[in-house]
Amino acid sequence: MKDQGCSSDNLKQYGQFDLRKNQSDYSHSPRIQLKLSLPIRVFTIINQIKSSTAASIRGDVLAGITVAIMVIPQGMAYAMLAGLPPVYGLYAALVPLLIYPLFGSSRHLSIGPVAVISIIVLEGLSQLAAPGTSEFIQLALLTSLLAGLMQVLLSVLKLGFLVNFLSEPVIKGFAAAAALIIGVSQIPHLLGISVDRSRTFYGYAKGIVVNADETNLITLGVGIVGIAVIVAARKISRKIPGGLIAVILTTVAVLTLGLTDHEVLVVGEVRSGLPPFQWIELDLETIGAVLPLAAVICIISFIESLAIAKTISAQHSNYHIDANKELFALGSAKMLGSFFGAFPNSASFTRSAVNSETGASSGIASIVAGLVVMLTLLFLTPLFAMMPKAILASIVVVAVVGLIDFADAKRIFKIDRRDFYVLLATFLLTLIFGVQAGVLSGVILSVVMILIKTSRPHYAVLGRLEGTKTYRNIKRYPDALLDDDFLIIRYDVDLYFGNAEHFYDTVIAQTKQFPGRDYIILNMAAIGSIDTTGLHKMGLLVDALAEGGVTLLLAGTRGQVRDTLAISGLQDKIGLQNCYLTIADAVEGHHSDDSGLSNRYASQTNV
C-alpha cells in the first residue's frame, strides 16, 4: 500500500489522533503524541487488518495453511542442507513467519528457510565448526543475528537503494551456479552414499564419481519416486503440496516395507515442543569470523526477497513495495528468530507464489502459516522420525531446478553481450570457488560494470535532419547533415573524476576526425552535474580548442550545471555569449553573427 503521508485527512488511516478534533486534549503534549503514533505506523499489518473483509480473511487462512504444509518438509530439508538437525528448519519457519508481516510492505511474501541461503550457511560455517554440532548451531544463530542487525541498520539509514548496485546478470549467474552446487550436494542423499562436504561443484562431483559403486538402489528409488510425485503435483497445480504428499507416501513405505532394514537412512527422532529462548554467545573473535558470511547473507537475502516481493506485487495492481521497510522486516525476522533457533532465512519464491495464488491478501496468511508450524512442533514431530532422508533431498533438488533459467540467459545474450559475459563470469566463479566467493565476485563485477559504463560512456556526433531544426546521431541517421562550420557533440553522462579524461580525449579526437570547424557545440542536455575534476578538464578543453582557433559553444545546459559553471568561474572563461538554450540557437546565432540569442540563456542562469 502506498504511503499516504501524514496529512490530517489520513491520520485515522495510520491509527493516529485526528488533529482536527479535541486539540485541547493534547495540544501541549507533542512528545506523547509522537510516541503513540510512531509504533502504529511501524506495524504495517494494522492497515492490512483494517482493510480486511470476512472473505479476504478466509482466503488468508486457506493460504496460510497451504504454505505451512509446504514449508514443513521444505524447512527440514533446507536445515539438513545447511548442516543443521531437521527440527531447526521448523524453528527457522516459525518466528520469521510471525515477525515479517508485522513490518513488511509485501502482503504475500513468505519468509523462512531457502536453499541458497542454506548452502551459503553450510559453506561459510563448515570451515569454523563441524556441521550438526552445538558449536555449528551457535555460529548459525549468531550469523542470523548479525545479518539481521545489518539489515535493520541499513533500513534505519535509508540505504535500501543500494540493492540497485547489484546487477541482474550477476544475480542470475550466481543463482544458476548456486543451484547446480545445491543440486549436486543432494545427489549423495539420493544415492545413499557418503561423500565429504565441499564448497564447490567439482568437489561434490568428484566424491560422487568415486563412491558411485556404493549406491543403494532402494534409496535411489525412494528419491526418484519423490521427485516424480513433486513434479507431477506441480504440473497439475502449484497449490497441490507435492512435497508433503511425497513425504507421506515414502514415510508410509519405510514403515510398511521395512526399508530401514535395507539401509535406507531416515531422519530419526525430531525434538518436540517450541524452541526455547536462548541468549547467543557474543565475543569479538567469533563475531569477526562470521561477519563476512553475515554480510553476504544480508545482501543476498534482501535482493532475493525484494525481487520476489516486487514480482508478486505486480500481479496485484502494483501495490507499493518499500525497500527500507523490507529491510527492517527481514532484519527483524532474522534477529528475533535467532534467539529461538532460527538460522538465516529469506523469502521463498515458490511459497510466496502459492501464498498469492491460494487467496492471501494480507500478512494474516503468514501469521496463520506460523501458527500451523507451531502446532506441528507441539504435536506432530514424532511422525517425522521415519521420514527418509532421500525424500528431503528430492524436495531440494526440485526446488533449485527453477533457479537455472536458460531462456533468460539467452535473452540477456541477445540484448547485451557484455551483460551476458558478466553473467557467465559470475556463474563460473561461483561454480569453481563456491557460493560465498561467487557472491563477493558478483558484487565486485557489478561495481566494475558501473565504473566501466560511467568512465567510458556513450557519446554521439550530431547532424541536422533535413528541413528541420532537429539534431540526431549521424551513426543512426546517416542522412543527417553536418555543418561545415560546426561540430556538434553530445556526451551522455554526468562529468566526474572517473570520466573527465575520457570526455576531454573524446572531444579532441572528434575535432581531429572532423577538421576545419570553427566551432564545437557541446550538447549538455544529458549532463546533470559536473565535479571539480570535470570542471578542470572542461577548462583545459576550452584552452586547447582556442589554441587551434576553435571556439567551444554550450547548448541545452541544465540549471544546476549552469550554477556550477558560474560559481567556478568557468562560465566567464567560456563566455556567456557562447552559451545557448538549444543547438539551433547556437547555430543560428553564429551564422547570423547575432549574439543577442545568448540573452535567452542569460535570463535563465538562475533557474
Image (cartoon, rainbow, N blue to C red):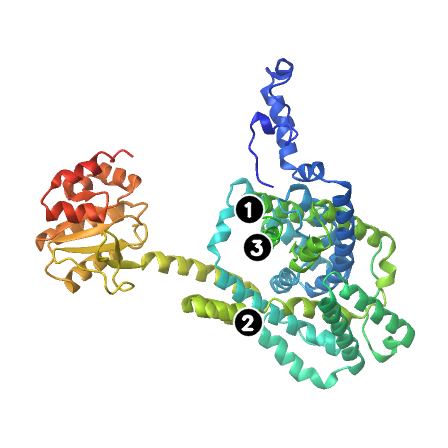
Q: Position of residue 126 (x, y in %)?
A: 64, 64
Hey, what amino acid is under mark 2? Phe
Q: Is residue 82 visible?
A: yes
Task: Say what secondary structure mark 2 lies in.
Answer: helix
Q: Which percent across, then down, holds residue 517?
A: 12, 57
Residue 31 location, quadrant? top right
Q: Amino acid at mark 3?
A: Ala
Tag 3 residue: 307
Seen at 76% across and 79% down, the residue is 220
| Front-most of residues 194 and 466 | 466
Pinpoint residue 418: horizontal percent, then vertical percent.
41, 67
Instruction: Please name the residue that numbered disc 2 is placed on.
Output: 406
- Mark 3 is surrounded, within 10 Å at the Cα level, by few (under 14), some (14 to 19) or many (20 or more) other residues, namely some
Mark 1 or mark 2: whose residue is earlier in sequence: 1
Q: Of all residues shown, which one is farthest toward the top?
A: 24
The residue wearing badge 1 is 323
Helix or strand or loop: what does disc 3 sit on? helix
